[in-house]
Every structure is written in structure tokens, then in C-alpha cells.
Image (cartoon, grey):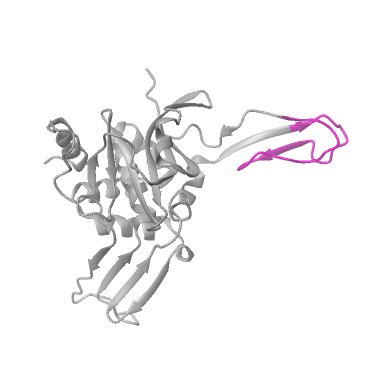
Amino acid sequence: MKTLFEEIKASIKNNYNQDRSFWRPVLPWGGVFTIKAGRKAVSCTPLYVEIRLKNTCTIDGFLMLLYVILNENENFPRELSLHLGREFVDYFLYLMDTYSFTTVKLLWIWDKMEKQQYKSEVHKASLIIDLFGNEHDNFTKNLENLMSTIQESYCSNWRCPTRVQEDQQRTININCGGLREFAQRVFCHGAPPFVVLNMQHWKSEDLAYVPYYLDLSDHKYLLEGATLFNKDEHHYSAAFQIDGHWMHYDGLRNVNLILLNKPPEFLLLSSLVYIRATEK
């Protein structure tokens, strides 16, 4: 049985007119999970028999990118297991390969998100989970441990009360009565398999001008994908490349995975995702 990733690669290889879409929807927007209550089912108050997901585009694009990243390098699942957990990575890949897309979203929500990051309410017999908001709050914020960096700085004034200081998230700007020298910023837990850059809503046409590789902490990172934002619909989608071909994923559309001949128009560039190059 082929994995979803193998199916997507096969659809690219067998595509001759450059406009063929993937044969079935992948990670559709929203989702419904039916609870199968048996004899040992635990009753809850209030009682609900299904879970409905809304506005899942804030995690959908990154879940798609995460799946592609995990399949790009045979060592990445092991490396990411150190940060995300081995059970999570294995179950995540299993759910994606079995097209259990609602369940894979619930896996991220319950395993990686905090309760205050989303809204939930019981309506009639359904638990409704609403992920409306910002993808950086709902996804990348939960990867801070993976991508955290640290930087030391030294003040030339020996009397400075904070002559040596460390900053784990951002560049230091301290008035210390002297000149402050900054050391190179380094990753706290070693070079991660991928990094996410917040692009503050550049135009998607600018995707052609962004750097295709970065040098970070003595490692080269290659552009793997991007998340895009539709301001009018307040909706996120994603683009990624496989075997040199760019694809656009949009869970809100009926045909939601298509080959790209050019960057999508009228969308804002929300994030860039780079993967660490394989050492030769």
C-alpha cells in the first residue's frame, strides 16, 4: 500500500499537462469525528456524540507541510521525535497515510495546543472546536522549543550591571553606558530539521524573490514551502515543493491540491518554511 506522499509523487510523475490536480481531497477544511459509544463508554456532562471542527485552516497548511517534511529525509522523523514525541510522530504519519484527516487535526489540538488557544462549546449533541485566529498562535507557537535560539552579548563597560547577558528569543537592546558586542545567535537544541520564518504578510508574488537557501548556525537550509493568507476570506493555504514541482494546498476548495505553474495571485505570504539540507 502506497503512502499518501508516494501517491502525491506518483501523481506529479504521471502528470503530462501540468494542470492536473491530485485525485482526492487532502486535509479538507473542518471535520467531523463521530464518537462510537460502547458499553464501556464514559458518560460526560453535557453529553455529546460527535466533535465538529471549524476554521481549521490555521493548522491545516502547517500539518500538510509537516507531513511533507517528515517524508523528505529519512532522519527527520527520528529527530522530530525528540521534540514532538515518538508516539506523536508515528501516529501522525499513520493518520495521514490512512486519510484520517479529522483525527490528525484532533491529534494536534489535544496533544500540542493549550486549551486557551481555541474556543469550544457544546451545541445540542456536538462538541464544536473553533480554531479561528492566527496560524502562528495555533501552530508555530507550539514549536518554540524546537526552533528556540540563544544569543550572548557583552558590554564594554566593566561597571555595567548586565555586562554579560543572554537572550533566548530576540535581539538585545540595552543602554549600558558602553558598546555592546553580540555573539552569533545559535540554536538552543542544535540545528533543527526545519525553521519557520514569519513573513508578516508579503505578497505571494514575492515568493519568486525570497532566498531559496539560508545559512544558519553553520548549516544550509533550503526553501521547502510557504503558507499563504487570503485577507478577504481570512483564510490560510499552503504551497510546497516535491521533486522540484510546486503544489498549492487549500483545504477549503473541492480540488484542494494542484500543481503550480506560478505563485498564487492575490494572496499574502504568511510564512516561509526551510528544511535543513542533507549533509554529504
Vertical position of residue 136 compared to residue 131: above or below: above
Residue 191 rendering spot, x and y as whole percentages: 48, 31
Q: Is residue 261 above or below residue 110?
A: above
Secondary structure, magenta segment, majority class:
loop
Looking at the image, which residue is at 66% across and 40% down? Answer: 167
Residue ID at (19%, 34%): 9
Above-or-below relation of 141 to 42:
above
- Residue at image position (29%, 76%) is 126
- Range of the magenta residues? 154-181
Q: Quadrant of the N terminus?
A: top left
Left or right placement of residue 188 versus residue 129 in this view:
right
Quarter of the image holding residue 248? top left
Q: How many marks?
A: 0
In percent of width and height, residue 131 lies at 39, 62
Residue 82, x across and y down, in percent: 42, 41
Task: Give the image location of residue 144, x and y in percent.
Answer: 51, 46
Of 203 and 189, which appears nearest the observer?
Answer: 203
Please give left or right for residue 46 compared with residue 117 in the image.
Answer: left
Q: Is residue 43 left or right of residue 173?
A: left
Q: Is residue 37 one of those drawn in magenta?
A: no
Q: Is residue 164 magenta?
A: yes
Asked where in the image residue 93 lies, by quadrant, the reply is top left
Q: Can you name the residue that lies furthest to the right here?
A: 159
